[in-house]
Amino acid sequence: MAGVFTLKHCSLVGQDATGTPIDVNLAPGPGDFSISGLEHNLTEALPVYNRGTYYEAVEGSDKGVEFSLTVYHEGALVDGGTDTVMNMVMKQGTFSAGTTTDAGGVVWMVDIVFTATRSGVTSTITLNNCRVMVSYTEDANGNQLQISGTAYGTGTTSRPVVIA
């Protein structure tokens, strides 16, 4: 039995779509990674009514999945020679030559990979094709970058979230 997973068993990485991905560890942080909006097939369920009475549900549009996490400000925010969170979000520094994960090739998107490993058991959550934003907060316990975004997937080839 693997036991209960905690923040001490987990890691997060942000990466682009190049053959050997440009990536950055999304750490150090307090361990507050959160995903919301997971449901079957990640599509809307639209109600159909028969003269005002619920009849059935039909599948609607794909849904994006919201996520958030916090990392501490450590080192330079943007650095040409080091992988940083801001480099990834702003497509600067080491990520300036990166390749978007978005199929259209225009809007900068990345994948976020969450891995939890304990006692030989590993679970992975991959957030595909994410538009990522950052907010910055000054704090007596350490300045923080609040990372948030939406995973959209890539249409028919990759769902917004893959859990393995």
Image: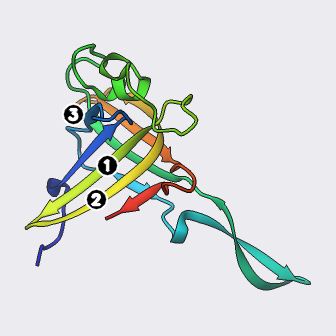
User: Which residue in the protein does label 1 denote?
Assistant: 113
Depth-wise, is mark 3 or mark 1 nearer the camera? 1
Nearest the viewer among 134 and 120 is 120
Point 51% across, 69% down: residue: 39
- Cβ atoms under marks 3 and 1 closer than 8 Å: no
- Cβ atoms under marks 1 and 2 closer than 8 Å: yes
Estimate the x, y position of residue 30 in percent, counting from the top left. 23, 45
Please tell me whether mark 1 sits on a helix, a strand or a loop. Answer: strand
Q: Number of labelled discs?
A: 3
Q: Local crowd at mark 2 within 10 Å, few (<14), some, or many (≥20)?
A: some
Give above or below for 12 relative to 107: below
Residue type highlighted by circle 2: Thr
Quarter holding the C terminus is bottom left
User: Which residue in the protein does label 3 denote?
Assistant: 141
Point 74% across, 83% down: residue: 56
Q: Viewed as shown, does residue 81 lie left or right of 19?
A: left
Residue type highlighted by circle 3: Asn
Point 29% across, 52% down: residue: 114
Depth-wise, is mark 2 or mark 3 nearer the camera? 2
User: Which residue in the protein does label 2 denote?
Assistant: 124
Q: Quadrant of residue 9?
A: bottom left
Q: Residue furthest front?
A: 19
Q: Quadrant of residue 53?
A: bottom right
Q: Viewed as shown, does residue 43 lie left or right of 26?
A: right
Q: CA distance from mark 3 to mark 1?
A: 27 Å
Quarter holding the N terminus is bottom left
Q: Local crowd at mark 3 within 10 Å, few (<14), some, or many (≥20)?
A: few
